[in-house]
Amino acid sequence: MKAGLKVSLALCILSTLVAGCGTRVPASKYKEGTYTGEAQGQNGPVKVSVEIKSDRISAVKVVEHKETPGISDAAIERVPRAIVEKQSTEVDAVSGATVTSKAIMQATKKAIQQAQK
């Protein structure tokens, strides 16, 4: 094989390998923004606000509820934080406030579904 042909073949193979190994930016899974979701709690609807940034759940806040003060407080504080930390709506429910915990998870899930592309 002639030297020129060897070089051309080597360059062709190298360019194919480089093109195939290029860094690809993964497609976004979510549209950035703030979304709301609602699910039934113990005493009525529980409404949450979910903020999506850089393809992640950046914040979850309970914005409206009629749950019993004192009983639901721990769930309203802990469950949103756990969702953000775990990046999942499948987190542990707070003992004694299971219905409220599950409502927060379900409402968050509904909000996230709105953000999906």
Image (cartoon, grey):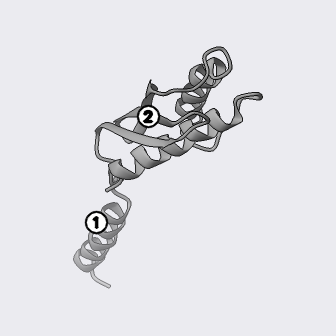
Compared to residue 74, the image places residue 87 above or below, namely below
Q: Which residue: 55% across, 36% down?
A: 104
Instruction: Report helix, strand or loop for mark 1.
Output: helix
> Residue 26 versus residue 30: which sits nearer the camera?
30
The spot of residue 103 in percent (x, y) is 57, 40
The spot of residue 95 in percent (x, y) is 77, 29
> Residue 95 versus residue 91: which sits nearer the camera?
95
Circle 1 residue:
15
Q: Is residue 52 left or right of residue 94?
A: left
| Badge 2 density bin: few <14, some 14–19, many ≥20, Cα 10 Å | many
The CA distance from mark 2 to mark 1 is 54 Å
Kindly tell me whether residue 9 is visible in this rendering. Answer: yes
Instruction: Report helix, strand or loop for mark 2.
Output: strand
Q: Which residue: 68% across, 20% down?
A: 71
The quarter of the image holding the N terminus is bottom left
Disc sitting over residue 47 in the figure? 2
Of the residues shown, which amino acid type is indicated by label 2? Lys
> Residue 38 versus residue 31: which sits nearer the camera?
38
Compared to residue 10, the image places residue 80 above or below, namely above
Q: Which residue: 54% across, 45% down?
A: 106
Q: Which residue: 58% across, 19% down?
A: 77
Q: Earlier in the sequence, mark 2 or mark 1?
A: 1
> Residue 17 versus residue 51: which sits nearer the camera?
51
Q: Quadrant of residue 101?
A: top right
Spot the residue most to the front: 43
Asked whether the residues under the numbered discs 2 and 1 touch, taking CB atoms below 8 Å apart as contact, a structural biologist would say no
Spot the residue most to the top: 70
Q: Quadrant of residue 14?
A: bottom left
Q: Quadrant of residue 59?
A: top left
The quarter of the image holding the C terminus is bottom left
| Badge 1 density bin: few <14, some 14–19, many ≥20, Cα 10 Å | few
Compared to residue 44, the image places residue 3 above or below, namely below
